[in-house]
Image: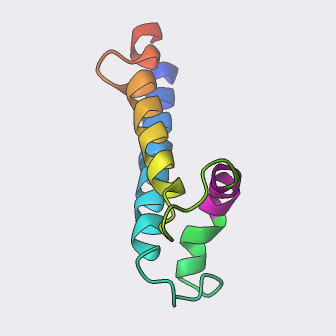
Amino acid sequence: MAPSVVLNWSVGLVLALMTLLFIFRIVLTWYPQVDLTKPPVALVVWPTEPLLAPVRQIVPPIGGVDIAPVIWVGLITLLREILVGQQGLLKILG
């Protein structure tokens, strides 16, 4: 398998996994009573919180609703399309 195919596949997989984790974070905002430090929820919080915290400082929760995960889903989806989409940079360069 060509290195460009492996890179394309790997980047797509990582970005898809991060999108899924942020979607889980969106669902977790509906349940504020859930303890975010206990497994298995901590497995979703650990990789996403370092990215969410700076966004929350720029865009605080609106009406008690945390929109930072929604922003990240949009950013990652855009990045995934730019890099590995049908006309993505990694496909063009590969």
Q: Which residue is drawn at 42% across and 41% down?
A: 74
Asked if residue 6 can be seen in this view, the reply is yes
Q: Which residue is drawn at 48% across and 67% down?
A: 63
Q: Quadrant of residue 83?
A: top left
Asked if residue 1 can be seen in this view, the reply is no
Residue 54 lies in the magenta-colored region: yes
Q: Seen from this angle, which residue lies furthest top?
A: 93
Q: In which quarter of the image is residue 82?
A: top left
Q: Magenta segment, principal secondary structure? A: helix
Position of the C terminus by quadrant: top left
Q: Seen from this angle, which residue lies furthest left?
A: 86
* Front in this rendered view, residue 18 or 91: 18
Position of the N terminus by quadrant: top left
Where is residue 84 shown, x and y percent of the image?
A: 40, 26
Q: Is residue 92 above or below residue 79?
A: above
Q: Is residue 85 above or below residue 51?
A: above
Q: Seen from this angle, which residue lies furthest front?
A: 63
Where is residue 68 shown, x and y percent of the image?
A: 54, 55
Range covered by the magenta-colored residues: 47-56
